[in-house]
Image (cartoon, rainbow, N blue to C red):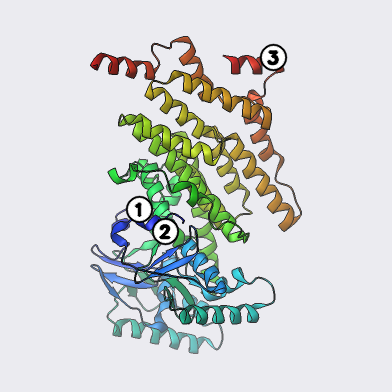
């Protein structure tokens, strides 16, 4: 939570920024990480716990001998110290992030976890500024360990957005609910849970027609891209919301006539 | 002559370079309108609507999906070059990415921000003036059928409709019911089947004291729904109708009208 204010670069303490980075800010001053040390620092940050030196070296430099990898690791550590970036606690066999170093990803990740777990407070009911960065962590990095973390964070944030949409509907903030759901749909138009959140937001607002259109365009998209149909209960949602509004011929006129 | 959103929403940004998508796309650089070359229009529209720095490869693939990566990259290069020749330097281009220059004003971003301020209750007094431009902005880049655009168009449409509905509600509370009706009607005109717009219109009519208009509006809408979809309005709108019918004197509108009569 405290991180939200430091996201733009202000604030105090040492922060490792992965969004739009990696780079480090110390009391709001930006410091660049030497190119050869970026992957090491990010790997340790993503592991959160202590990492064995040998394990880290093997992940970062999988090609070549172990001695070579260990040498590369030593030189990456040395370059970090040379650049005055003192974020790691290093001993003979392991590496970890200093306890007082914050990582920007953690704040977003915690926000998402609170929403998914249902423990979010009112202050969590907006998208954090970093949400779009969080959906594409470290773009252009193709290391296996980075890909896994990217996908994990992406799923977590998408689930959080869907949960947030539901929360906003519950408190009657329909405009924002539709907005959040559409953002999730934009990230992955084929994702059914996002489409469902959007549909539910339209229906909760009383906009049956918008809901119907939304279902139709999703159905067309699925047919075109994958040749499959949406799960039946998605259509059921729309019909169920329209059903009580389908009048018997007599009563319909009556309601209109008042 | 199309509406100039920058003029309406950010007159103070008049001197900054601007990208207009409504009624365009075209650029305004040094106060002078510049036409955009064909490929450049699509690049600028995509970058402006995505709000962030984009990878060159992603842009090329999105805009020229047919014909292979190398061809797409070539098209992108030549479109960027033609933009520069046209004297439109709104993009920051480096080896791998494209972004809009940070000092560029984009008209639909201003429109989005206007709507979000109203939706989230952070509006400024100037946000409550005028409903002339929203209809034009709602049909973004008509005639373009790219997938990425269809989605952004729908997103902007939803945002502006919610913005107009919020504006109408705010105006009712501020005792400016006539303007509230106008805002609600703009939303209804854009999508007559949208129930939340009909709801705020009915409430705005009532706030004016026009019980007749309110009832008539709901009846017309019911008729439209019945013909088009074979359904009746939702419980909230019908509840409003019932309240007006059973207790016309306690309906909010009648109360307001009484107060006004009293003041006379």
Q: Nearer the viewer, residue B32 or B82?
A: B32
Quadrant including the C terminus of chain B: top left
The residues bearing labels 1 and 3 have C-alpha atoms spaced at a distance of 49 Å
Looking at the picture, tell me which residue is in the foreground, B32 or A76: B32
As drawn, the label of residue B69 is none
Query: Which residue appears at 71% of the width and 58% of the height?
Result: A225
| Cα gap from disc 1 to disc 2, whole angstroms | 8 Å
Q: Are marks 1 and 2 in contact (CB under 8 Å)?
A: yes
Report if residue A147 is visible in the image. yes
Q: Residues within 10 Å of mark 2 (few under 14, many from 20)?
A: many
Is residue B44 positioned above or below A115 on the image? below
> For mark 3, does the 10 Å Cα neighbourhood hold few (<14), some (14 to 19), or many (20 or more) residues?
few
- Marker disc for residue B9: 1
Point out which mark residue B107 bears. Answer: 2
Whether residue A116 is visible: no
Q: Residue A210 placed where, x, y %?
A: 59, 40
Residue B81: percent from left, percent from top: 51, 82
Chain under disc 1: B
Chain for mark 2? B
Provide the secondary structure element on which disc 2 rests: helix
Q: Quadrant of residue A89?
A: bottom left
Indicate whether A230 appears above or below B143. above
Q: Nearer the viewer, residue A202 or A85?
A: A202
Q: Residue at x 56, y 43 (%)?
A: A197
Q: Which residue is mark 3?
A: A250
| Disc 3 to disc 2, C-alpha distance | 50 Å
Residue depicted at 34% across the width and 76% down the height: A90
Residue A255 as seen in the image, left or right of residue A58? right
Q: How many marks?
A: 3
Secondary element under disc 3, as helix, strand or loop, is helix
């Amino acid at each position: 939570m405290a991180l939200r204010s430091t996201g733009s670069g202000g604030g105090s303490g040492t922060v490792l920024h992965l969004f739009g980075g990696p780079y480090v800010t110390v009391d709001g001053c930006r410091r660049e990480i030497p190119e050869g040390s970026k992957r090491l620092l990010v790997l340790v940050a993503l592991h959160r716990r202590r990492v064995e030196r040998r394990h880290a070296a093997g992940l970062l430099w999988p090609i070549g001998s172990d001695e070579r990898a260990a040498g590369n690791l030593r030189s990456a550590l040395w370059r970090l110290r040379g650049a005055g970036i003192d974020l790691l606690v290093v001993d003979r066999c392991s590496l970890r992030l200093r306890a007082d170093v914050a990582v920007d990803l953690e704040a977003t990740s915690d926000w998402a976890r609170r929403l998914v777990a249902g423990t979010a407070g009112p202050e969590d009911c907006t998208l954090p500024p970093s949400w779009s960065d969080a959906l594409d962590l470290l773009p252009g990095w193709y290391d296996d360990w980075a890909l896994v973390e990217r996908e994990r964070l992406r799923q977590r944030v998408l689930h959080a957005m869907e949960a947030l949409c539901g929360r906003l509907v519950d408190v009657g903030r329909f405009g924002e609910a539709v907005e959040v759901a559409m953002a999730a749909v934009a990230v992955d138009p084929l994702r059914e849970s996002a489409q469902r959140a959007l549909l539910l937001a339209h229906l909760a607002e009383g906009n049956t027609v918008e809901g119907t259109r939304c279902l139709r365009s999703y159905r067309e998209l699925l047919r075109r891209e994958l040749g499959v149909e949406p799960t039946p209960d998605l259509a059921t949602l729309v019909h169920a919301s329209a059903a009580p509004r389908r009048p018997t011929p007599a009563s319909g006129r009556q309601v209109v006539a008042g | 002559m199309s509406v100039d959103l920058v003029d309406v929403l950010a007159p103070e940004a008049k001197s900054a370079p601007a990208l207009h998508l409504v009624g365009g796309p075209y650029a305004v650089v040094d106060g002078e309108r510049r036409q955009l070359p064909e490929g450049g229009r699509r690049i600028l529209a995509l970058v402006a609507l995505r709000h962030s720095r984009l990878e060159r490869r992603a842009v090329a693939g999105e805009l020229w999906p047919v014909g292979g990566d190398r061809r797409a990259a070539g098209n992108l290069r030549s479109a960027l070059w033609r933009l520069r020749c046209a004297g439109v330097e709104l993009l920051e281009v480096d080896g791998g990415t494209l972004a809009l220059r940070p000092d560029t004003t984009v008209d639909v971003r201003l429109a989005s921000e206007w709507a979000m301020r109203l939706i989230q209750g952070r509006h400024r007094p100037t946000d409550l003036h005028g409903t002339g431009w929203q209809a034009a902005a709602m049909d973004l880049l008509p005639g373009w059928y790219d997938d990425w655009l269809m989605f952004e168009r729908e997103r902007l449409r939803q945002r502006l409709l919610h913005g107009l509905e919020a504006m109408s509600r705010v105006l009712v509370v501020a005792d400016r019911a006539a303007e509230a009706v106008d805002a609600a009607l703009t939303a209804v005109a854009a999508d007559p089947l949208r129930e939340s717009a009909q709801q705020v219109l009915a409430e705005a009519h009532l706030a004016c004291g026009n019980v007749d208009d309110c009832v008539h509006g709901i009846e017309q809408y019911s008729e439209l729904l019945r013909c088009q979809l074979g359904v009746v309005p939702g419980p909230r709108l019908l509840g409003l109708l019932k309240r007006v019918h059973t207790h016309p004197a306690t309906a909010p509108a009648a109360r307001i009208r009484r107060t006004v009569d009293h003041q006379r």
